[in-house]
Image (tube, helix red, strand yellow):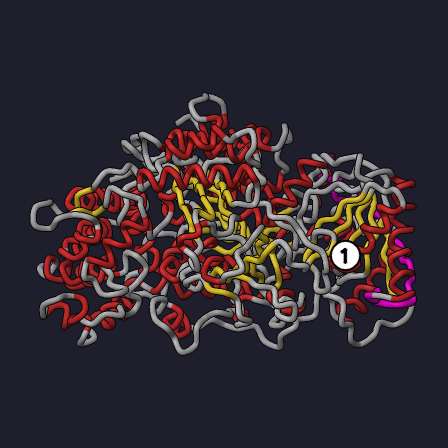
Amino acid sequence: MSLDRADFGAFFAEVHGGHRPFRWQLRLLDHVLDTGCWPDQIVAPTGAGKTSVIDVHVFAVALMAAGHGRRVPRRLALVVDRRALVDDQYDHAEQVAGRLRDARGRDDVLGRVAAALDLLRWSGGEPKGAPILPPLRTVKLRGGAPPPRSWRDDPIGCTVICATPDMWGSRLLLAGYGSRREARPREAGLLAYDTVAVVDEAHLSQQLVITARRVAELAAVADEPLAVPVLQVVETTATPSADAGVTVGVEPDDLNADELLQQRLTTPKPVGLIPLQAWPIPRSGAAQTTGIQVLVDEAVRLRQTYGPTVGCFVNTVAVAVAVTHELRSRGMQTELICGRLRPHDVAALRHRRPGLLNLTGNSSVDVLVSTQTLEVGADLDLAAAVTELASGGALAQRAGRVNRLGQRKTEVSVVAPATDLPDKMNDSPYRSSDLTAAHEWLRERCADPRGLAPWALRDSRPPSREPTRDLFQRLELGQIWHLARTSDDLAAEPDDLDLWLSDDLSEDHEIGLVVRRMLPDDPADAIRLIQALPPRPYEVFPVRIQSVVTTRMLDLKVPAVLVRPGDPLRTFEGERLRPGDQLVVDDTAELFTAGVLTADGTGQVSDVLHDIDPPQIGQVVLRIERDTEAGRRLLDAAEALLDEQGDLSPADLARLLHDHATELKPAPMVRAAAALLDSSADGPADAGITVHRLLSDPGAGLTRLIVVDLRKAAADDELRQSWSRHRRRVTLQNHAADVAERAAVTATRLGLGAQLIEIMRLAGLHHDDGKSDPRFQRSLGADPRTMEPLAKSGTVNVQWMRRLRDASGLPTGWRHEQLSAVHAWRALSGQDAVQRDLAVRLVGTSHGRGRHGFPHPSRHLLPEPDDVAAELFDEGIWDELIERTHAHWGVWGCAYLEAVLRAADGQISAEGR
């Protein structure tokens, strides 16, 4: 592979519009390549290009894959406590991934990097029938949005994960917010091994850094640690710390060597104070009007002096909405963005105002109003800014969005209290002590002509935020052994991990709020609708849990469906919400102000489920109800076909959609659904069709018809356990042999060593042995008397499979992998005890259950008495086996090996084998 260290400059230029890397970025790459480890700290002021850690990671992994350099982590986790920055970093990672995907087969530097990354998985090309995987996989883990799952099936590919601290940290601690319980060990294992975590703005996440580094220590506590790089943790900061360990970053000589970097970091940003009598700005009254007027007057002055676009940073959503309204009333072209907007709304803003949210800018926008959302990391190049007083670190970050490229004169104005701050402020995200310290620091910066220029702040650091907790917590091994019981109903469930993840124990976590048109009044029908159409990432409002309560949902009796991964759907009755939960409400709910969820909102927002043009693979979703004349006619025609044929085929529905295409809305989604159904007629099951009648009146006629894109259904862990996407039956013997081979190949590619490679092969060979049970075979539609045992059914008809399961005679909650562990214990009795213990453990936990126990004793697992089953599950041997393997291989080591085996199984299933 003709790829070497000297190609990094050309690679960097390709993904950064022709710009060459700075010297500190080259030093970072050299450090990673020379040592195989990332530094403990990266010191880079605002504007120095910290997002380049993505480019360094991708190139270093590509060099490793090409046979050059040391073993480096395959996964990069970028963790930061700002949703907008998570999105910004993810956008860059997606852009790099897209460029690499498009470059496959070319001989330029991008093509060679893509080819090298492809070698990570399969040195001889993709296996026959395997989906074509991207050279670089990107993942976004952010509160309130449905978390992606496909990354868990790719332990050997190059991956970039962009996440908020609670979403990443909870997964590291085997309790992933928003994840199904069965997936938690896999995620923890993959994040604890072969991963580097770069915690951006680490001063906001000190407890997280402490916990992550402690996990790296505890992961090595094992009789036989894995020969895979353990988690590496990197802090990024604008100001160096003497005791931070190994540091790489911007050095004074770099400014002399690079004019562009010098311009970005040293161009003055003068700052001035504007006194305000009432602080903070009240929610109503004359004082509120005055405060809003002061902010707006200054924004207008800055716009007239420096041109577009001026930033206006405020501390609360209520002030942001009021300022936006007043600016628009004065004829200012104004846009508002805050963290409570849906991804769809942000994407619509990007489409409406191209360039506004990046360095290109959009001169048609006079003022951009934001809360804390855009203060960290967003690549804005604002002409000037006015901001409410905030903590010192927040002010430095807000100033960092101003004149980011250092190419013009600018100014930053800070609206601050005219007198001493009150001891308690009920309407501010900052405490009085932090604001007082920031106020004093600002007076010093006002006297310095350099103002808030990034390089000047190395010598005059913003005052640190006062810790909100008396003591940071040290994670202990016993606590991890408790958290590792992911299958058990613990007396103390790990719903809230703030003790180990958060710097502020009073902070709220995020859930998601989804608005849907015509949510049925009948709770059972509403639940059935959301089961068929679960929330999509683009339609989810990120919401602080406490905000949901304060928006008067309960007082207004707003009906809602609670979506909690791994739990049955149910109506929301005011119970305690958990991070990662989602609430679905009707679009008549009056909870919004100017399209933003607020505590006292009285407005509505629209359903955006269908609002994608054009929908991408996996995004096609069409819901047809009787609320329009065209919808009524189509449903009547569909009902006639159902009465006549007893079924509604993809071809039939495609024809109906084509017949009504000019009347049905929205047209892009209707056309996409019709095309999808056409392709499903004779090929793989690419579309699912659901028809609903009123539960309260089944004879009332067809009330709803839903089409869902299944082209990504292979990523569903539960579905693919018993379903082949190619509509063909898969025999148990062939599936087991394929999984065993893939598990061994994967372990070999990861360098796990001969012993573990053989253990993984044995576990793959026996992981589905329990499916041979005649009752399970009947649940797949097989006749156990005449047919070879099946691993996968040839149907994706969920209702039919449910009926087969109910008629099979299997107990409720019965798991085939529990019985597989019994068979494996017998089959591997001649193996070394250590090998057998681990192989059988991996078989039993292959779907995330059995950690530490299964719900069924031996008499429910099998219809006849079985000595091995009784020994394992009645006499406590299974619990002992779990503890022994934890001690020998480590808690995260076992989780990692479970992830590798499950990935092999998932890959084979996704290939239809």
Q: Give the percent coordinates (x, y) of residue 820.
A: 18, 58
Q: Nearer the viewer, residue 44 or 625?
A: 625
Query: What is the secondary structure assignment of the residue under circle 1?
Result: helix
Q: Which quadrant would the N terminus be assigned to in this image? A: top left
Which of the 4 image quadrants contains residue 655?
A: top left
Q: Which residues are magenta?
A: 260-283
**Who is closer to the viewer here, 91 or 256?**
91
Residue 356 can be seen, yes or no? yes
Residue in view at x 15 percent, y 58 percent: 824
Kind of residue at badge 1: Leu
Quick check: 620 above or below 505? Answer: above
Q: Residue at x 16, y 57 (%)?
A: 775
Residue drawn where x is 28% and y is 36% of the image: 726
In percent of width and height, residue 76 lies at 49, 48
Residue 151 against residue 189 in the figure, above or below: above
What residue lies at 46% left-to-right and 36% top-to-bottom? 617
Residue 616 within the segment the image draws in magenta: no
Residue ID for mark 1: 395
Q: Is residue 10 above or below residue 571?
A: above
Q: Nearer the viewer, residue 321 or 786?
A: 786
Q: Residue 280 lies in magenta, yes or no?
A: yes
